[in-house]
Amino acid sequence: MTSSSYLIRSASLLGTTTADILVADGIITAVGVNLGSEVVGEATVIDAAGLVALPGMVDLHTHLREPGREDAETVETGTRAAALGGFTAVHAMANSSPVADTAGVVEQVYSLGRESGWVDVRPVGAVTVGLAGKQLAELGAMADSKARVRVFSDDGICVSDPVMMRRALEYVKAFDGVIAQHAQEPRLTEGAQMNEGVVSADLGLAGWPAVAEESIIARDVLLAQHVGSRLHVCHVSTAGSVEIIRWAKERGISVTAEVTPHHLLLTEELVRSYNPVYKVNPPLRADADVLALRAALADGTIDIVGTDHAPHPSEAKECEWASAAMGMTGLETALSVVAETMIETGLMTWADFARVTSTTPAQIGQLADQGRPLEVGEPANIVLVDPAARWNVDPHAMATKGRNSPFAGLVLPGKVMATFFNGHPTVLDGKLNTPYNHGVN
Amino acid sequence: MRHLLGTEALSRENAIQILDTAQEMAAVGEREVKKLPALRGRTVVNLFFEDSTRTRISFEAAAKRLSADVINFSAKGSSVSKGESLKDTAQTLQAMGADAVVIRHWASGAPARLANSGWIDAAVINAGDGTHAHPTQALLDAFTMRAHWAKLSGTSSVGADLTGMRVVIAGDVLHSRVARSNVWLLRTLGAHVTLVAPPTLLPIGVEHWPCEVSYDLDATLEAGVDAVMMLRVQAERMNASFFPSTREYARRWGFDDARLAKLDALNLKDTIIMHPGPMNRGLEISSAAADSPRSTVLAQVRNGVSVRMATLYLLLAGDLRENTTTSTPAAVNNTVPNAKDPS
């Protein structure tokens, strides 16, 4: 355990009041204006004038690919990317190989995260064995494991069988878990390549209709209500889904929802290039959907931003559209894309940003040490952002192994200057520093 | 213009230039020696990821009549999952010095990917990609319609378009690259297009296309029509609930003997019947219709070679001009000494 202390001088807390933050032994030990030397002692001073201090970001939706697809990403490279992106915790999705459907696999991923030390790695457990939708995975064993899994998802594949979904929602009540659903009616999306609409008609690409997402969400919120359980909807992508979730929340149904940065910025018009870097599931939608998603994130209908960071090796994208893998990287651009779409547009403040990228995702994932206020006695998971900086997105300069960023070449606002994880700077001056050392496990 | 990927972005000038050049090329096909030296020493690769003997031999004949060297590369089934990638294939052809790649691919957008990826410098000609586009088919269809339209009005087809022509395209529009390419090109050339199909075989979003849409073939014919193009119904659609049975399909949307008689009854004596082939006789078109004097099926095949010669010639030896006049280029006049108007 490191015992270094740091003084973050003159940061703007959540973009409002300016204060100093003293960090020691992993804890915020003082917050105040012009903290005196009698308080600060030997702390390393970090000049944060002009920077916004936020709680470390928590991603509920990350694909780290390990075990099985270490050519695409490893826990080490993925969590480096996360730290650079301002995250202090990520939830590793279950669609690894082998699938994270046993206590053994989730403990392996958890341990790899601890060894890497860049962020908290919280494994997501599969809902069904092998993501096959036929038999419940041992959810209780994963919950009781060292990884303490609370979020379960077959992400990439929808739990489409209504009985299976009902049972999963019911069963996780035993340990206050949550089912994170990838809402995609499989029969309506066989061979689907892009959003179904004007553009798919022109391009001759098989359509992924909005109704395939919306019909599953409608079913699932009713199931969650019926069995009195908690539902989380992954990567909401359509205006119609927003309406259904709004309706469910008005009725008091326990549902939370997530939107990805790319669905807040990009539209299906980009697919006209046939460049598979824009191929993702759920697909990029239309302008009206993007505007509805932004409004829903601002008004709280959508609770959080989740990256759905999905790195792929270059050969999975350097091919014809139909053969290409679905997915985009997102950890290192999430903050900037949300700044571009939500803050620069005046829809949200940095305090709102903290809520949707840290506080609420930590609550959904039940991470007690994450998403906490920047107050004395709280864990020192902090990110410092230069809100005025603009940077050119270059996938080749990223820490992730994936080069499949749809934002390549864009100039985006907001740069992560430092990330503190358990009081240790994993990122300093906008560059990777050193990982946190968890000591002997 | 370096590539021919689709017809949506094809200007009226370029389209008419291709059709006029094809008309010159057609004259070559009527000579005893059906060969021009225009592409001597140039290499044209027919890169086919999907079986299509008709289209391949049409392009092969076109390239050979222009004296190009032709390499046929059948890469059926190739994909990332199955073996060599499109990128590797493209770079192989680049290393072999291909000047033009004629690509047929099961994936929509594969020709665009080839043209825009930087993997290869050659001119790319789309010979049909997935359910997206088939521009040379649309051009040969337009060429066939233009010859017919000019003959009716007793004028030369050179430089002409299809203004005022009423075209019905009937069948599986949803999965048809032929329909898509025709809709855009016929719009550009001034024709009035009506698509007729069961609602299950029309794409969501079709209301944004520059054409009319109908579910009723009889009513559409009765409204008056100058060309009826029947689309092939693929076997794999027949058991996927797009329509209840082949018999019901044929009754409601097929060009059967009754509808052939209807053209006569409506006194539409000059209406032509088109089909891109291969035909399902008895399903989307009856034998009597396919073999009637109204049928242009064989003329379409013949015109295909001319249009493909024109495309290869203009992309490799000529210049497809933007926003210029529509006269036949001097370069073509020089290489086609016996040019005449075949219509």
Image (cartoon, coloured by chain):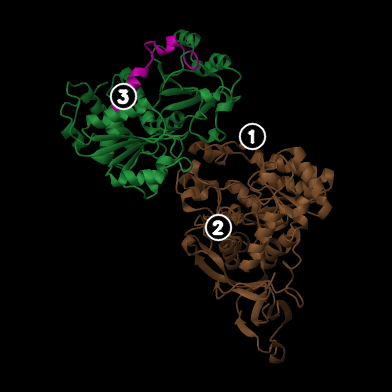
Q: CA distance from mark 3 to mark 2?
A: 53 Å
Q: Is residue A348 visible?
A: no
Point out which mark residue A421 bears. Answer: none
Q: The numbered mark 1 sits on a residue in which chain?
A: A
Comparing B36 with A88, the one in front is: A88
Q: Position of residue A415 (x, y in %)?
A: 56, 69
Q: Position of residue B14 (x, y in %)?
A: 32, 37
Q: Are the residues under marks 3 and 2 on the same chain?
A: no
Label 1, secondary structure: give it: helix
- Residue that carries the numbered disc 1 in the rendered image: A187
- Residue that carries the numbered disc 2 in the rendered image: A73
B103 displayed left or right of A167: left
Amino acid found under the numbered disc labelled 1: Arg
Chain B tint as drawn? green
Q: The numbered mark 3 sits on a residue in which chain?
A: B
Amino acid found under the numbered disc labelled 3: Asn
Q: Is residue B130 visible?
A: yes
Asked if residue B316 is positioned above or below residue A35 in the image, the reply reads above
Chain A tint as drawn? brown
